[in-house]
Image (cartoon, helix red, strand yellow):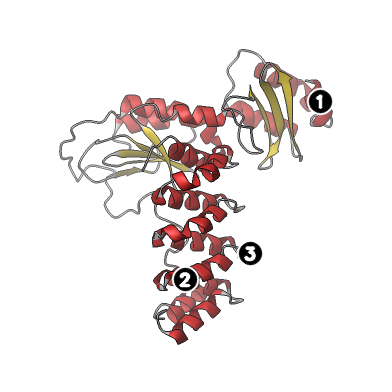
Amino acid sequence: MAHLTRDALGRIELDHLAPVKRLLKQFFSDASWSGRDDDALAELVGSGTGWWEHDLGDGYQLAFGWRGGAFRLRLARSDAAGLPSDEGAMPGTASMLEEMFEGAVVPEATPNPRTIRFVTGDLHRGPSRWYESAANVDDPRVARLFSEFDDVANVLVGPDFVAVGIRRPDRWEQLLGPLLRLIEAEFPATSAEDDDAGAAGDVDTRPSVDVRGTNAPSSGSALDRAWRELRDLKPERAGDRDRLLAAASSHDVWMRQVATRVLIDADADTAAQGWRDLLDDPSRTVRRATVDAMVDADRPTLRPLLERALGDPDAWTRWKALRGLVELGIEPSRDALTRLATDTDFRVRLEATAALRGYTH
């Protein structure tokens, strides 16, 4: 308590002191502590900056401060995974995530930070079924997901997976374990029979939860113009290759974004030359498109560039680079991936833990 008062809680409004003390007493007791309690404490403490970590002895660590604009308080074993905690990860999260890969259902990160895909094994042979709210749910298993977890925003039940979207991605640390246990209980793999394709909630043209967001068609005129100008270039022709590399260093962000995708058709050396520079692009969208293209190229010679992308400030870019390295085989990059087991982004930590545990998608 002395650490908290000295470092972070010295300027709480007077009328908030009593409820803050009650919540802190609850946190440090044997009582349960939920995401709602987290949010209630954050609202009472208010805005601020800073993050503090204090060793309490006997292998325990107290960490607190502001993350994503909200006050957070964590208490865990500092040696839980044999790894130091990082600024964004809850101490002990790596150890918790390892346990998620012991059962029959395995969680899998997706490009959407709000969505986790739970790989179950065969559930049915009909089309995937999409539920965008608790209304009109015809599946009692899905109804239970909505009723027991207020955070659940949507559910997709596929032939061999259940994808769950929640309203706030920062809640996955608290929700992953309970959701995994419920899905293991409610969605056991079966010898699926053909389902009725006309059932309510069926989808057949809805995009997968794994659809990437970096190169999808857009109605934006600037991006459309860039595609029209570059899509027919033939990189094997010297003149077209020069135009493509010039576009990759253009002042126009849309030209650079399209160029990084078109580079996939260039020879390996030319593509690597362009992507090497684009990995440092000031635009997050361009860096995402660059890593996306490198992963689709599936070339072992790109491993050093993908490893470099693991240090990108954008979590999606780190996650996609990690996926690319998994597809190439993680052993040459194991040390780089190990560092991501305590990444600041939950999705990255989940992907890294899966890879290091030998689980492949």
The first of marks 1 and 3 along the sequence is 1
Give the distance between the C-alpha atoms of the residues marked 2 and 3, in whole angstroms: 23 Å
Query: x%, y% of residue 170?
Result: 56, 38
For marks 1 and 3, give the one nearer the viewer: 3
What residue does disc 3 label?
282
For marks 2 and 3, give the one nearer the viewer: 2
Q: Secondary structure at mark 2?
A: helix
Q: Is residue 220 visible?
A: no
Q: Secondary structure at mark 3?
A: loop
Give the distance between the C-alpha atoms of the residues marked 1 and 3, in whole angstroms: 39 Å
Query: x%, y% of residue 295?
Result: 43, 58
Question: Looking at the rendering, in which quadrant would you find the N terminus?
Answer: top right
Q: Which mark is residue 5?
A: 1
Query: x%, y% of residue 303?
Result: 48, 56
* Front residue of this view, candidates 11 and 65: 65
Judge whether 149 appears above or below 355 on screen.
above
Picture residue at 20% right of the left edge, 41% below the top? 125
Q: Which mark is residue 269?
A: 2
Q: Secondary structure at mark 1?
A: helix
Q: Amino acid at mark 1?
A: Thr
Judge whether 234 appears above or below 152 on screen.
below
As drawn, which residue projects farthest toward the left? 193
Judge whether 155 appears above or below 83 on screen.
below
Query: x%, y% of residue 262?
Result: 43, 72
